[in-house]
Image (cartoon, rainbow, N blue to C red):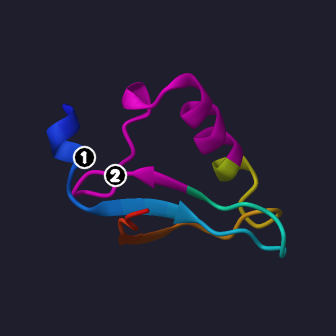
Amino acid sequence: MNASSYSTGWELRFDPLCDGHRGYAFPRDAAGHVDMDSLGGRARHNYLYARAMMGRETAWPDVRPTQMH
């Protein structure tokens, strides 16, 4: 997939389960998929970490509109 197919304004978000911990958000396509090949090394590592920590350190992911910072 190319970058434009991930410009949908949606993200896959993993919220922290404990106060003081960080959450993670990743761009996704219209079908809800994260293109791991388009993520940089650190982002890919964070994505795999967030997935592995679901229910322990992060909540189950939620699809949300992209939050502009």
Kind of residue indicated by mark 2: Arg
Q: Residue 26 carries which label?
A: none
Q: Where is residue 55 in the image (x, y as percent from the top left)?
A: 76, 67
The disc, 2 or 1, on the residue closer to the chain's N-terminal end is: 1
Q: Where is residue 47 in the image (x, y as percent from the top left)?
A: 59, 43
- Against 18, residue 1 (above or below) is above
- Quote the CA–CA distance across marks 2 and 1: 6 Å
Instruction: Between residue 39 and residue 53, name the one nearer to us.
Output: 39
Instruction: Between residue 54 and residue 9, name the one nearer to us.
Output: 9
In which quarter of the view is residue 1 placed? top left
- Against 23, residue 48 (above or below) is above
Task: Sort mark 2 into few (<14), some (14-19) or many (20+) by Cα contacts within 10 Å.
Answer: many
Task: Sort mark 1 into few (<14), some (14-19) or many (20+) by Cα contacts within 10 Å.
Answer: many
Query: Answer yes or no: do the residues labelled 2 and 1 have beta carbons within 8 Å?
Result: yes
Decide whether residue 26 is among the magenta residues: yes
Q: Residue at x 35, y 49 (%)?
A: 33
| Residue position marked by numbered label 2 in the rendering | 28
Q: Position of residue 37 (x, y in %)?
A: 40, 26
- Left or right: residue 7 compared with residue 63: left
